[in-house]
Image: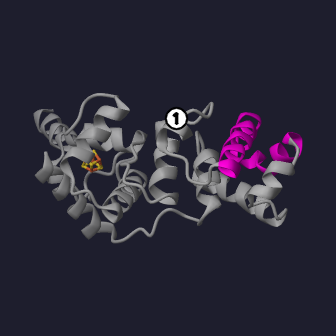
Amino acid sequence: MREELLDLYNNLYEEYGSQNWWPGEGLEIAIGAVLTQQTNWKNVEKALLQLKNAHCLNIDCLQKISIEELEKLIKSSGFYRVKARRLKNLIELLSTNPQPDRKTLLSIKGLGDETADSIMLYLFEEKYFVIDSYTFRIMNRLGLYNGKNYLELQRIFMNNLPSKLQLYQEYHALIVKHAKSHCIKSNPQCVNCALNKRCRYSIEQNKKSMER
Ligand code: SF4
């Protein structure tokens, strides 16, 4: 598996180059990780801009602001009522514990593995491989993993890849890039995909079309 995962990384890197992820810096990364739950990044950007214009991209303001005001500012990110409460809880934690560990982040209601690992990897620069729906989709189509278990797939990456922060950061970003540009959920662009020679899904589709 080590070889397959490194090959995959190299193919993606050759295709797309460095992604310079995660967007934003400092606290913005943690806020973005919460806001991006169940929405796309464009909507998150709008909410971040609203927070920025209100001078509220900082712990002090986010502690003082009312839930109602916060809901208004982050409305574009969807599920804003739930997210406003999650953000408040996260800010409360960060105000007393500026660098919590993964377990402490997960103790915040509504913060799951993916959000916690995004914060750990991109804000605190701790080596946790981030798994998301794009990772499951690509690994499944390539024929490298069939399940839906976050921690199991994370272990596969972390047990097989060299333990390097930049590699973890770049790899996840490249997976997101590939899933958005080629390995699209309902309409994968296999013909011009850099991975099509080694992809189980593409090989099976080709076989089927030859049999027709
Ligand atoms: S060949 Fe198709 S299914 Fe396979 S990784 Fe590329 S886009 Fe996805």
The x and y percentages for residue 197 are 14, 52
The answer to whether one can see residue 57 in this image is yes
Write down the residue under mark 1: 112
The x and y percentages for residue 185 are 40, 41
Q: Main secondary structure of the magenta part?
A: helix
Q: For this view, does 24 lie left or right of residue 114?
A: right
Q: Residues within 10 Å of mark 1 (few under 14, many from 20)?
A: some
> In the image, what residue occupies the spot 23% across and 35% down?
145
The x and y percentages for residue 135 are 35, 44
The x and y percentages for residue 167 are 31, 62
Residue stretch rendered in magenta on the structure: 67-96
Can you say whether 106 is above or below 98 in the image? above
Residue 24 figure quarter? bottom right
* Foreground residue among 203 and 6: 6
The answer to whether one can see residue 185 in this image is no
**Does 79 lie within the magenta span?**
yes
For the residue marked with disc 1, what is the amino acid? Gly
**Does 139 lie within the magenta span?**
no
Can you say whether 148 is above or below 166 in the image? above
